[in-house]
Image (tube, helix red, strand yellow):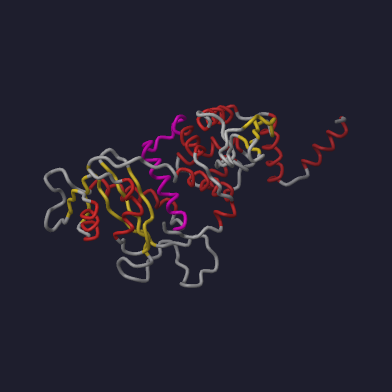
Amino acid sequence: MSAKGFRNLLQYISSMDKPHQERIYYEIQRKIFPSNATTRVIDELRDKRYSKGFNCAHCKSNSVVRFGKYNGRQRYKCKNCGKTFSDLTNSPLQGTHYPEKWIQFIDCMLKGMSLRESSKELGVHHVTLFYWRHKVLAALEQMQIEQFEGILEVDETYFLFSEKGKKNINDRKPRKRGGVSQFRGISKEQVCVIVGRDRNKNTVSKVACLGRIEKNQVEKTIGRFISNDAILCTDGWRGYKTYAIEKGLVHYRIDTKKTGYVIKGLFHIQNVNNYHGRLKQWLDRFKGVASKYLDHYLAWFHFLETIEFEATKSNLKDMLIFACLFPVDKTYDSLRKSKFMIA
C-alpha cells in the first residue's frame, strides 16, 4: 500500500463511529497478535480431544488428514464424509469472532462479574456475552458423575416459573422482579429442582417437573446414578418411600416431628438442604433467571462448587477445556428460540 493510500485508510477509520473502530482494532489484534494464552489452551484442548487419535467432528470416522490452515488455525478433512473441521468445531468457541477473548471471559464468569461489567472489560457487547455464557453452560451441563456412593441425600426445591426476557406473554400478566405466584403453596407455577448429593459431594441437580414432584421424575432425573447399595436419606414424602421399596434401597425418612433432624446420629438431609440454600443465594444475583435456562445455571453453580469458587488460572483453564470437550451445537438463534423443556 502506498503512503497516500495508508493515510486515506487512517482517515477513513477516524471517520467511523466508536463501535466499528473497536471492531477493527480487535480484528487486527486477532489476526496479527494472537493471544499466547488462548493458543496454549487450544493446543491443550487438541491434545485432550484427540488423545486416542484424530476422528471426524461430524461422522466420527478415523480417516482424517490435515487440510491446510484457516485464520491461522489448523484445519482437517475427513476422507469418509468429505467435510472439514478444526480444533474448535462443535465447541462453544466455534463461530465466535473473538476466540482470543474467551480466556478473559471465563475469568469474568469465575469472578461473578455481570454481563455489563464483563462487556466493559472485554469490549464485547453484553448480549453477545450472554450467548457465550450459555454456550459454555450447555457444555458444562453434560458433565456428569459416574455414580453416587454410600449415603445419598435427596430432596427437592422450588423456583417460581419465569419467562424472563420473553416478549408478549399472553397467558398471564407479566410479573415485576420479585413477583410471586398467584397460587398459594406449590403449584404448576413452581419449577421443581431435584438434588441428589452423597457424602463425597458427588452432586446431581436437575429440573424435574412443574409443581409437586412425582415418583417417576425421581427415576428420570437421578435414578441412573443410584447404585443398589446406596443408602437413601429423604424427607417424609411418601413418593420417596415407594421409590426406595421398588429399587430395594435402604431408606431413612427424616420426619422432624417424629424422628428429629438426624437418625442414629448419621442419617440426615442437612447437606442437600444446605446446598439448596447456597444455590438460591447465588441465583439471587441474577435478579431471576428464565426457567428454560435453569439447568444451565444449575450446572454453572455445581462447577463453581467443585472448584470452591476460586478464580485461579488453573480453574479458568480447566473450565474452558472441560466445556470444549463436550459437543455443543447451540447457536444464537437456537438459544434465543429455545423453550422450557422437562426431560
Q: Residue at x 20, y 55 (%)?
A: 245
Q: Residue at x 21, y 57 (%)?
A: 241
Q: Residue at x 47, y 34 (%)?
A: 316
**Where in the figure is residue 19, as x and y percent of width and height?**
68, 46
Quarter of the image for residue 257 reads: bottom left
**Where in the figure is residue 116, as x and y percent of width and height?**
54, 48
Quarter of the image for residue 150 reads: top left
**238 or 340: which is nearer to us?**
238
Residue 111 within the segment the image draws in magenta? no
Q: Residue at x 27, y 53 (%)?
A: 155
Q: Main secondary structure of the magenta part?
A: helix
**Where in the figure is residue 259, as x and y percent of width and height?**
12, 54
**325 or 301: which is nearer to us?**
325
**Where in the figure is residue 124, as x and y percent of width and height?**
61, 44
Quarter of the image for residue 303 reads: top left
Above or below — where is 165 with respect to 9? below
Residue 295 within the segment the image draws in magenta? yes
Q: Which quadrant is the C terminus positioned in?
A: bottom left
Taking the image as shown, residue 124 lies to the left or right of residue 316, namely right
**Residue range highlighted in magenta:** 291-315
**79 or 225: which is nearer to us?**
79
